[in-house]
Image (cartoon, rainbow, N blue to C red):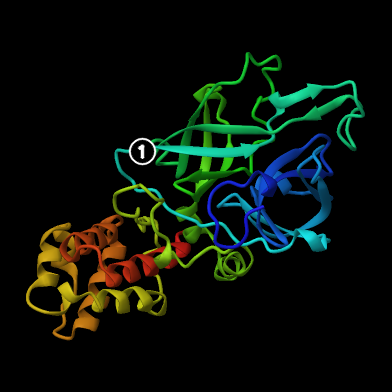
Amino acid sequence: MRGPGEEGLDAARVAEVLVAGTPGRRGSGYRVGDGHVLTAAHVVAGAASVRVRFDADRPGEWSAPARVVLSAGVADVALLEIEDVPADRTGVGPPRYAAVPDADVVLPFSAMGFPRFKLRESGGEGERGGTPGRYRDSCHVTGTVSVLSNLREGTLELAVAAPPADPEPHRSPWEGMSGALVWCGGAVIGVVSAHHRADGLGRLAAGRVERWYASLSAAEAERMRRSAGLPPRTALGLADGVEGRRPAVGLAELPSDLPLRELAELVDALTAVPALRGGNGLGLVLDSISDRVAANSPRDPRLRMDVYGIVRTCLRYPGTLDQLLEAVRLLEGPSPEVDRMDGAAARLARFRG
């Protein structure tokens, strides 16, 4: 088993998530620390109890009860706390997390889980707690991510080898794969969340890591940082070997009457951008977005007050705040100040109506 600091999918850390309360329900997950497993929220929703199992029917097999300590339905991500970790199973560090750019790229990925089509019959004892003679084997899935698909849903489209003809049309052969972590360039870029039947058997959907920041509350984000190693939004880089800018969070759905105090972090970040602090930088930004903002903003010679007025005006015209931030990115280019601005925007996105 890999220790702290080592990257890439480790089969010994892949978990079967066995759920009591709904007959036959199970999912996949991954150990992200000594005592925690990351999975999809819908896998454990309404569970009477949960058990996680590792290396089933192999020399290193072990299992333990787990409890749900975080379940974020909008992000479809959940964190399980393992209640009894064997002493010889410690020393597990968090994985590395990464984003993928909203760009015309197709990326390789891998994932490992326990889908329904991997049910097997054996002459042996069978999997514990299930029907004798039947067990569900692991599935190491590889394929490609089409980044620009599923933009409205906000998920990654995973192109995979289709399983054999489905004998039960009312059930997906991919049942049980939800919760598997999606890996690219040695880092986690998502969590498998759904199989949309209309997409065919060769497509899965996965929640994107960079979208979590807009969906998690401050307390949930802190729990993910402490227990799963999720970095701050400003520290989330791109997967190794992937080029492009980290995707921005959309703010078009922010309420127009957002209190001034909620805008303070974004305004502070904008006023720290060097390109806006001198010359005609702010004027160039306004010239490149909707003219309604410049026409209706109460301008002020003090930069902070000026930026406050522009941001408040943008809230009245949905989509223009996103235009403003993108113009700043283009004008300033990659910089710590732009990363700070993007982090503030991601946290502000939680107030979407």
Q: Residue furthest left?
A: 279
The residue carrying pointer 1 sits among few (fewer than 14), some (14 to 19) or many (20 or more) residues within 10 Å by Cα, namely some
Q: Is residue 10 left or right of residue 125?
A: left
Image coordinates of residue 236 in percent, x first then y, are 42, 61
Seen in the picture, residue 335 relative to 201 is either above or below; the reply is below
- Tell which of 253 and 221 is nearer to you: 221
Q: Residue furthest bottom?
A: 302
Image coordinates of residue 346 in percent, x first then y, are 41, 63
Assign a secondary structure to mark 1.
Answer: loop
Amino acid carrying label 1: it is Leu
Residue 67 quadrant: bottom right
Residue underneath mark 1: 148
Image coordinates of residue 154 in percent, x first then y, are 45, 45
Question: Measuring 59% from the left and 60% from the top, which residue is drawn there?
Answer: 94
Residue 150 quadrant: top left
Question: Measuring 40% from the left and 80% from the top, which residue is drawn there?
Answer: 261
Image coordinates of residue 256 in percent, x first then y, are 36, 65
Q: Is residue 174 left or right of residue 265?
A: right
Number of marks drawn: 1
Question: Measuring 53% from the left and 23% from the top, which residue is drawn there?
Answer: 161
Residue 91 quadrant: bottom right
Q: Is residue 204 left or right of residue 266?
A: right
Seen in the picture, residue 225 relative to 105 is either above or below; the reply is below
Question: Measuring 67% from the left and 47% from the top, which residue is drawn there?
Answer: 29
Q: Is residue 59 left or right of residue 307?
A: right
Seen in the picture, residue 256 relative to 245 is either above or below; the reply is below
